[in-house]
Amino acid sequence: MLSFRNIECYSELIDENEFFKQFYNPDLPLRYDSNFFQLKYQPTLSEFELIEEMQYQFHANEGLKHMKFYWPENKGFTSEIMAYFEKEHYAIEMLELYTIDPNNFKSLEL
């Protein structure tokens, strides 16, 4: 089955623990989708704040001006997490994954 784990993010896995996987590409510091934490499960607020601080410190040390977290697939946010995101002015995006069969593309004769 195809999932977001199959998408190339143009970065390397530089750290992994029971909470998250950390991806980083020093050559693409402005590319959000190359520098992020992929959460392994839905954290409590206190766990998220710890993970957030770890990302903040790493990104500050590397000169990155953003923070990005991928939430676990098919998990929503608790009301506590949502309130925190609103208070801290986080933007939330929902991604959908579609597949296209290459055989459906038409070739162009030049």
Image (cartoon, grey):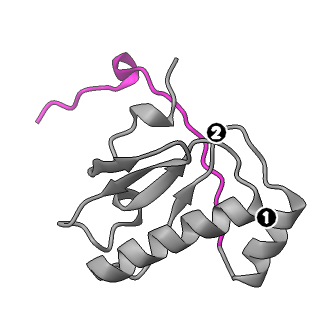
- Furthest toward the right, the residue is 79
On the image, the x and y values in percent for residue 13 come to: 31, 47
On the image, the x and y values in percent for residue 18 come to: 53, 42
Q: Which mark is residue 81?
A: 1
Q: Looking at the picture, does residue 19 appear above or below residue 54?
A: above
On the image, the x and y values in percent for residue 64 come to: 34, 78
Question: Going 53% across and 73% down the picture, which residue do you hit?
Answer: 53
Q: Quadrant of the C terminus?
A: top left
Residues drawn in magenta: 91-110
What secondary structure is marked by label 2?
loop
What secondary structure is marked by label 1?
helix
Marks 1 and 2 sit apart, C-alpha to C-alpha, by 16 Å
Identified by mark 2, the residue type is Glu
Q: Mark 1 vs mark 2: give the one in front.
A: 1
Q: Which residue is mark 2?
A: 73
Question: Going 56% across and 47% down the picture, which residue do you hit?
Answer: 19
The local crowd at label 2, few if under 14, some if 14 to 19, many if 20 or more residues have their Cα within 10 Å, is: some
Identified by mark 1, the residue type is Ile
On the image, the x and y values in percent for residue 39 come to: 56, 49
Q: Is residue 102 magenta?
A: yes
Q: Looking at the picture, does residue 79 appear above or below residue 60?
A: above
Asked if residue 10 lies left or right of residue 87, the reply is: left
